[in-house]
Image (cartoon, rainbow, N blue to C red):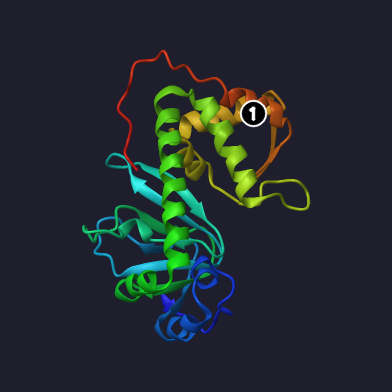
Amino acid sequence: MKRSKSQCDLNRCFLCKSCLREWHPALSLHRVNYNVKKGEVIFREGEPVTGVYFVHEGSVKVHKKWGPEKELIIRFAQEGAIVGHRGLGTNLYYPVSGTALENGVVCFIPIDFFEATLKVNHELTYKLMMFFADELQESERKMRNLAHMPVKGRVAQALLTLKEKFGLTDDGFIGLELTRQDLASYAGATYETVFRTINELLGEKAIETRGKDIKIIDENRLLMLTQDVDFSIADTPVPVF
């Protein structure tokens, strides 16, 4: 990554908005902004933790290895969001990777300074604790869905979540251009299965596609698919994320 000349106004991201105004000069002194290219790895699973990142421009996928050649996308981060925080704790190795989905800018905060920031800024510490709690609930929901929800339902849930998170373009498409492989990784399915599922949803006129872009036509149909969860299925191993 190359250092960026772009500087934030210390008012946009999760970190800056939650810190004391008196702490902003310290933030300005310790932060480093980097330009990232589409597909560039920002931090890699298994590497020692050097710090945390905040998305200044663009979007980032947070993903984890799932078998030798597969990955599972855990979440997407937009402007202002924190990434790399899963490396906090006593085992200072990143348990996940972060990769840019488009050209953008990320703000890097060294781990020692970030920990000092948490000790000084109680509002930030509280908000980060609540953020971790929300992430835990979402991880538990995804594990349940991987074990019990059919692939079609998981794809439908993924599309609904992406719509909620990224909104819609002026012509009604989900506001994130995502490859079918990334959609498969987010839904916890194979590329081939997701490809077939997308074709089924097209045939049912539940969605519309334009290249990589997807538009939800029948949201009620997708919602019905997400309710199709069979809890009578015996517990099956699922990845921990």
Residue 79 x/y as whole percent: 56, 64
Res. 90 visible in picture: yes
Residue 48 x/y as whole percent: 24, 64
Residue 220 x/y as whole percent: 70, 27
Taking the spot 32% from the left edge, 23% from the top edge, the residue there is 236
Taking the spot 41% from the left edge, 51% from the top edge, the residue there is 132
Residue extending furthest toward the right: 171
Query: Quick check: 4 left or right of 176?
Result: left
Query: Quick check: 143 left or right of 57?
Result: left
Taking the spot 28% from the left edge, 65% from the top edge, the residue there is 49
Decide which of 180, 107 is in the foreground and name it.
107
Does 39 sit above or below residue 6?
above
Q: How many marks?
A: 1
Residue extending furthest toward the top: 232
Residue extending furthest toward the left: 91
Category of crowding for the residue at label 1, using alpha-carbon neighbours closer than 10 angstroms: few (below 14), some (14–19), many (at least 20): many
Residue 135 x/y as whole percent: 44, 47
Query: Quick check: 165 left or right of 67?
Result: right
Taking the spot 47% from the left edge, 66% from the top edge, the residue there is 123
Picture quarter containing residue 59?
Answer: bottom right
Q: Quadrant of the N terminus?
A: bottom left
Does 219 sit above or below residue 87?
above
Three-letter amino acid code of the residue under disc 1: Leu
Q: Which residue is mark 1?
A: 222
Res. 212 visible in picture: no
Picture quarter containing residue 87?
Answer: bottom left
Q: Quadrant of the C terminus?
A: top left
Tell me the SS state at disc 1: helix
Picture quarter containing residue 92?
Answer: bottom left
